[in-house]
């Protein structure tokens, strides 16, 4: 693994480490969905080498033949230490955690604990498309409460939805995305406490998808949902998957607030058979030993956010990038270009650059596209150049 940046002072920016030729050798979804002439800036994979402690932990496990089933609380302990250090939150109690196969399957299992078939699940579009797919697949009913014009949760609209969802005395859940994909909104402590208050008042259970929590911009504070007053009955999903680019090494953690421990206790034992032992090893090493690498990625993403602003101003001044405080994604309002409901399709067809279509993100997605910033600046620059070639 020579030449791979590692978690040491002065390490190179991981977002400057790989070139296109090397990235094209990858066989994951980002790199193999489209033909070779398409530049992929879509699905949430990062174009970085892995953090050295992660490579070492997984390589050591392979050398040892340590490829059996996962057991124990090492992952939860690593997350608890990370949360205490990073977010000054001491609230992760290992006995109120469970290892789940990944965040979306964790979301499904949490929703299963607190709702039944046909029950409403409230989401805030535009939002990560699998929120619709997984919720519908498990026979729950998606209720859309769009973010407001500033891309923030709208408490009045949420309260109205909570009231309607529980009007017949049935169960309902709110699937919160925090930080929010695709807009990069970081919910404040005040906003989250308001959500918790509304949920308690109306008897709605909150499931918070906090997969992007490690990925907040330098200087921005992430607030864990379970840390706010009133969130004791909440459930959360966290993972090292997005922050350290480990989606292929499956594992995530479900966390229960103090008053949701009994709910999590009803999680069927077989759910714990899904995560990969190598995934747990990789995620644990990331949280424990690779915070320097994460900071380098975050600095690189911030530089790319600024670069995107400059590139759009130069090449596509009509396109508006919403100001994001988290994730490595940029949500682009392309409506002024007049490319119709699905500008990503036009960028693909005419520019040979793949962004995520805004349409599957639900209400507010038409005319929008999502761009993945976790790529070397040269690739980002070429991507915007290709986008700019599309409208003509
Ligand atoms: C908000 C959100 N949740 C979940 C996931 C997927 O996580 P996992 O692969 O652990 O299911 C993603 C991936 O981008 C995401 O953005």
Image (spheres, grey):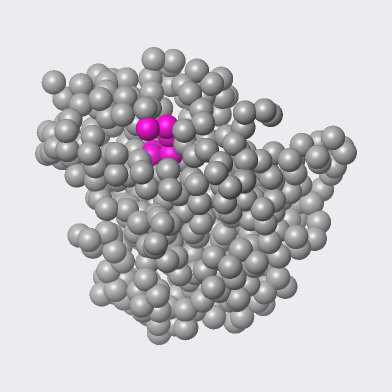
Q: Is residue 379 left or right of residue 232?
A: left
Q: Is residue 233 left or right of residue 132?
A: right
Q: Quadrant of the C terminus?
A: top left
Instruction: Give the quadrant of residue 368.
Output: top left
- Residue 376 located within the stretch drawn in magenta: yes
- Residue 233 located within the stretch drawn in magenta: no
Residue found 68% across the figure and 44% down from its top: 54
Please tell me which residue lies in front, 306 or 10: 10
Residue 374 versus residue 220 in the image, above or below: above
Residue 311 appears at what percent x and percent y?
23, 34
Please tell me which residue lies in front, 309 or 66: 309
Residue 38 appears at what percent x and percent y?
38, 20
The residue segment tinted magenta is: 372-377
Which residue reaches farthest front?
10
Residue found 22% across the figure and 61% down from its top: 150
Q: Is residue 39 visible?
A: yes
Residue found 51% across the figure and 76% down from its top: 227
């Amino acid at each position: 693994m020579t030449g791979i940046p590692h978690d040491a002072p002065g390490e190179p920016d991981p977002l400057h480490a790989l070139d296109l030729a090397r990235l094209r050798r990858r066989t994951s979804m980002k790199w193999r969905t489209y033909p070779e002439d398409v530049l992929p800036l879509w699905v949430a994979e990062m174009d970085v080498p892995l953090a050295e402690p992660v490579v070492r932990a997984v390589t050591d496990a392979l050398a040892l033949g340590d490829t059996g089933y996962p057991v124990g609380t090492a992952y939860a302990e690593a997350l608890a230490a990370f949360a205490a250090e990073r977010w000054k939150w001491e609230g992760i109690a290992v006995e109120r955690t469970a290892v789940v196969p990944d965040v979306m399957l964790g979301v499904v299992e949490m929703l299963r604990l607190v709702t039944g078939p046909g029950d409403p699940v409230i989401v805030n579009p535009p939002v990560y498309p699998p929120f619709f797919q997984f919720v519908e697949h498990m026979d729950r009913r998606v209720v859309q409460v769009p973010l407001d014009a500033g891309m923030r949760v709208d408490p009045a609209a949420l309260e109205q939805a909570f009231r309607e969802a529980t009007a017949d005395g049935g169960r309902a859940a709110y699937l919160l995305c925090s930080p929010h994909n695709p807009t990069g909104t970081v919910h404040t402590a005040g906003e989250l406490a308001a959500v918790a208050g509304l949920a308690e008042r109306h008897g709605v259970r909150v499931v918070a998808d906090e997969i992007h929590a490690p990925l907040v911009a330098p200087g921005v504070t992430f607030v864990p949902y379970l840390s706010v007053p009133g969130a004791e009955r909440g459930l959360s999903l966290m993972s090292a998957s997005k922050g350290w680019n480990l989606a292929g090494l499956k594992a995530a953690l479900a966390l229960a607030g103090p008053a949701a421990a009994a709910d999590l206790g009803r999680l069927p034992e077989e759910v714990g058979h899904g995560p990969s032992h190598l995934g747990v090893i990789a995620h644990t090493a990331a949280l424990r030993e690779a915070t320097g690498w994460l900071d380098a990625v975050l600095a690189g993403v911030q530089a790319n956010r600024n670069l995107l602003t400059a590139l759009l101003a130069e090449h596509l001044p009509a396109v508006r990038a919403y100001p994001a405080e988290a994730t490595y994604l940029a949500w682009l309002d392309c409506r002024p270009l007049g490319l119709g409901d699905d500008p990503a399709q036009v960028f693909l067809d005419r520019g040979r650059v793949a962004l995520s279509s805004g349409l599957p993100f639900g209400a507010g997605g038409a005319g929008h596209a999502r761009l993945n910033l976790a790529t070397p600046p040269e690739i980002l620059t070429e991507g915007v150049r290709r986008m700019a070639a599309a409208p003509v």
